Image: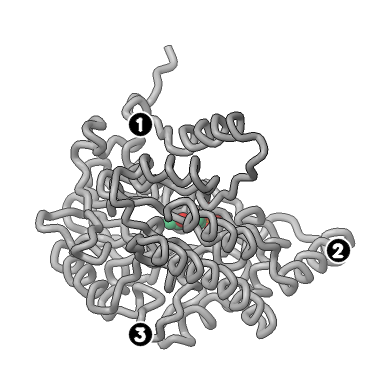
Amino acid sequence: MIQINEHYQKLAASYLFVDIAKSIRAHQEAHPEQDIIKLGIGDVTRPLPAATLEALHTAIDEMASPDTFRGYGPEQGYDFLREAIAREDFQSRGVAISPDDVFVSDGSKCDTGNIQELFSPDLRVAVPDPVYPVYVDTNVMAGRTGVFENGRYQGLTYLAGTKENGFVPPPPKEEVDLIYLCFPNNPTGATATREQLAAYVEYARKHQALILFDAAYVSFIRDPDLPHSIFEIPGAETCAVEFRSFSKTAGFTGLRCAYTVIPPTVQAWTSNGTPVAVRDLWARRQTTKFNGASYPIQRAAGAIYTPRGTEEVRSLTDYYLENARIIRQGLDQAGFNSYGGKNAPYVWVDAQRPSWELFHLLLEKAGVVTTPGAGFGAAGEGYIRISAFNDREKVERAMERIQAALK
Ligand SMILES: *Cc1c(COP(=O)(O)O)cnc(C)c1O
């Protein structure tokens, strides 16, 4: 008899986007004349930067000629891309990351989901709340939690982001082994200072724990004092792994390219206390289960690091950040307190009522779709997330409608 992995049965069905879609459909049927503006989903809407498209076309043409055709590439990624990443994203900021520490992949969702399999099944895990669900669900699947009860899994440590801590929770009081962090944050748009990250690095070193740092939104940082990488914090080179993605940075959600950074000094231990380099484990995992991101896509990602590509990515992220500013200003005029949206493409809004209530109110009165914060975890109750990933004109119209509706 083929038996299933019963930990899958513990997964709490995520009805969030299904319920949202259902509400939209019902509203559309009742008001067929109204066009609905969707500021709910965390996907980009603007086309790819021209420099990446040009590189993509050139690479595809290379595949058409026997002299320049390429088959399987190196599992860890092509040198041209790993060298550009190490130089431009790290060394240029004084961080000693080498191309050997960079593992190119087809997405941060898989990287942040896969990494946990390098570690023991009975680790103690801490996750942010509200949270990007991948961190939680992959640990549920691996059997590191109990059952789902009252909005939380037993056995997980939840680090609650609240108004009081500015949505940057401090390290846990109890001892944990694996800690997920995401800054700039999805869904709250919060960013962490050097001091706040340093507290986590100190915690990790003290407890021989590992930090998994998701920096998918790093290219939205404009405040020069904010760290871009966990590796800007001294000591992190022994206790952290960083994930970055071209998805939100350069509009690659449909192209697929990301990378993971693991310095050789990052250690984990065997049950009898022998240290092992996490980079070697990940190299082994990737060369066994992954055959590399496609050549044309890696060429497209490489083009981001040319002067023209850098400039185009900057104006693309500036565009979304201006949307975020318009959203914050619109909400302020409508009488809401909101957070984030300054170094991140998400605005986190104090709903002044249950999440779903404000969601329905904005849908019914203004025809604007948002995301109820409760869908991201217990600590998200009482908030909604508004995404700045949309076209300017729609964002402006959405804010006008919200203001008119709530007068
Ligand atoms: C969008 C997003 C990613 C990127 O995922 P990809 O698989 O690279 O598209 C990673 N982490 C968070 C928190 C995200 O919101």
Label 1 crowd bin: few (<14), some (14–19), many (20+), radius 10 Å: some
Q: Amino acid at mark 1?
A: Leu
Residue 33 position in % (x across, y down): 67, 39
- Please state which of the two labelled residues, at mark 2 or mark 1, is closer to the viewer: 1
Distance between mark 2 and mark 1 Cα atoms: 45 Å
Nearer to the camera, 283 or 58:
58
Q: Residue at x 61, y 67 (%)?
A: 250
Q: Residue at x 34, y 44 (%)?
A: 355
Label 2 crowd bin: few (<14), some (14–19), many (20+), radius 10 Å: few
Question: Which residue occupies the extreme left position in the image?
Answer: 173
Which label is found at residue 11?
A: 1
Q: Is residue 149 above or below residue 302?
A: above
Q: Quadrant of the N terminus?
A: top left
Residue 399 position in % (x across, y down): 52, 60
Looking at marks 2 and 3 on the same chain, the residue that comes earlier in the sequence is marked by 2
Query: Does the residue tagged 2 have its C-beta within 8 Å of any atom of ligand 1?
Result: no
Q: In which image quadrant can residue 398 be found?
A: bottom right
- Please state which of the two labelled residues, at mark 1 or mark 3, is closer to the viewer: 3
How is the structure coloured here? one colour
Identify the secondary structure beneath mark 1: loop
Circle 3 residue: 225
Q: Is residue 403 above or below residue 20?
A: below
Distance between mark 2 and mark 3 Cα atoms: 43 Å
Residue 256 appears left or right of 283:
right
> From where the camera sits, is residue 190 visible?
yes
- Please state which of the two labelled residues, at mark 2 or mark 3, is closer to the viewer: 3
